Image (cartoon, grey):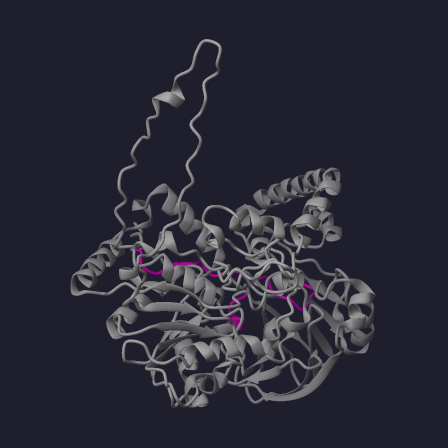
Amino acid sequence: MLRVAPVLLTRLVRARPWAPVWRRGSATSGEEEQFVFLEYEPEPGEAAAAEAAAAAAAAAAAAAARRERKAEPGKKRRERRSVVGTPDPSVLPSGVSCSGCGAELHCRDGAAPGFVPAEKYRSLSEGPAGVAGLRGAVCQRCWLLAHYGRALRLRLPPEQHREVVSAALRRPPRHGRGPLLLYLLDVLELPDPVLPQLPALLGPDVPAAGLLVVGNKVDLLPADSPGHLGRLRQRVAAACAEVGLHGAPVVDVRLVSAKTGFGMEGLISRLQRSWKCAGDVYLVGATNSGKSTLFNALLRSDYCKSRATDAVNRATVSPWPGTTLNLLKFPIINPTCDRIFRRQERLKEEATKTEDELSSEEKKYLKHLKKQGYLVGRVGRTFQRLKSSSVIDFDPDMLSYSIDEDPRDSPRKHEEREEFTHNEVKDARWCFDTPGIIKENCVLNLLTDEEVKLVLPTSAIVPRTFILKPGMVLFLAALGRVDYLQGEKPAWFTVVASNLLPVHISTLSNADAFYEERAGQELLKVPMGGEERMKEFPPLVPQDITLKGIGPTEAVADIKLSSAGWVAVTAHKEEKLLLRAYTPKDTRLMLREPPLLPYISTIRGARIAGTAAYRTRKPPSLVENLKTRERR
């Protein structure tokens, strides 16, 4: 789908539908270039279809805008009621946790975690079940995240997240041994900023029995060359070795996508083979690493007891940092020999299937996942709970009626929530989802919830490559900037960031004026809000970087612009480059050597005449545990 500013849409549709948007003239002549790309370059025969789809999308957007304007007054009133609610400070906290984020439910303070509007709180807690009626309910914050994609600002200091995690990890060992730590890190954030804090969170008194490091979000990165997953795994292992985790020996390093399912079946098999059901498991990691998504994936897999899927709610998932505020948990299934055998038989059978042999529902879901990421996996269940057949409740008195009466429907009975029995949980081993550790010096901490949605990539990243000469400047939205100050030859700069963030090419002489004029505006997109927003946003701070090229097909380093993304720099062999990179004040700018994807500049189309850009190219998706169709 084409994502461009509305003012540019008409001009783009009239031109070629696959072309980027740019201002006429080259950056070297004093004019700027702005590039907004499609996620991939379609085949030549797709141009007409793409143009028709873009026109239809524009018409649908206009109709939706008209409907929204008509319903605006009522919509605003509904949103105000849903966001504000009514607190009641006289009511004591419930002692019941939110099933979405783990915070204690209450109606005392609308700005505190776990708040439920007093009207809703009373309707749930004043019934026959009392406070137990709140079980399974979610707080207002989780409701808005799940249904509206909106995040409420809470008065919750980052230290509280660490305190909750540290207190959980330092509990006395259950079942005679310490827990297994399942540390989840975002491969886009390597080296992980929170991993060095892990020994301090554990403490010396209660060491963990082991550490299994999981690199998440590999589905977002394209394969720059054969064996790229092996290199990524080595980078994750090297990051663990650099930290020196003495208290918790590293059991293994795995690469997964909790969102698309890639690597999940292998992770479950590894856990059941090495850890079995020896003790509790804690999911630990930084905010936005995907812990809640992994928790939900494990909850619906062979790692969780089959009955628990009806008794445990899924964790709230959102791009806003710090969604989980307390501990969530589900019981781990005991991987007996019989269960392991049955699971392996299922995996073998599924691996022999082709895409044509899947059901229509499976094909539809698989097609959806392929649009989300490059690497896809199918996660199934071997052990299903056998539910008793439903019994029809026949009440003749409710069905009988006289000639003067209308038929009366039998009132619906309240569906009781599944609960674990004492015998089911007294010796259970649990998998805990913990609050994410807030990353310090991170640009996400400076952004609003709408801006975070644009910055964090949620679908497969399409690399954008530019060839720049000395004296040219590359902007990544208004969050980062790279100046090419000195060099003998042009160099390639490949942007690896959210597809929704615009890239702008300018000249060194015009760059400062351009930023002052356009920051906060639609052209640079993030931050958004005009001059008032930029008054509170910190200025960009420079850092000089010197590099030496190693060849036109291999990047020498990544310039990581905090969590906004990075720019891979590729230069001719022995070519010396003097660069200056900028990020907002008090955020982390890092030079990553060697680069995460050294051959990323080769994933590009032909050069666009008259510009510094190459056409984008999206590699095909790969399904992990599915037999490839034989080509005839």
Residue extending farthest top: 403
- The magenta stretch is 599-626
Viewer-proximal residue, 446 or 474? 446
Q: Is residue 530 left or right of residue 83?
A: right
- Based on the displayed image, in which of its 4 quarters is residue 451 positioned? bottom right
Name the residue located 33 percent from the left edge and 30 percent from the top edge.
Answer: 393
Name the residue located 70 percent from the left edge and 43 percent from the top edge.
Answer: 75
Is residue 619 magenta-colored? yes
Is residue 247 magenta-colored? no
- Based on the displayed image, in which of its 4 quarters is residue 374 positioned? bottom left
**Tag count:** 0
Q: x, y percentage for residue 258?
A: 42, 63
The answer to whether 195 is drawn above or below residue 48 in the figure is: below
Name the residue located 68 percent from the left edge and 54 percent from the top edge.
Answer: 84
The answer to whether 324 is drawn above or below residue 17 in the figure is: below
- Based on the displayed image, in which of its 4 quarters is residue 583 positioned? bottom right
Q: Is residue 217 visible?
A: no
Q: x, y percentage for residue 464?
A: 59, 67
Viewer-proximal residue, 621 or 107? 107
Q: x, y percentage for residue 205?
A: 39, 89
Q: Is residue 187 visible?
A: yes
Q: Is residue 261 left or right of residue 595?
A: left
Q: x, y percentage for residue 474?
A: 69, 73
Principal SS element in the magenta part?
A: loop
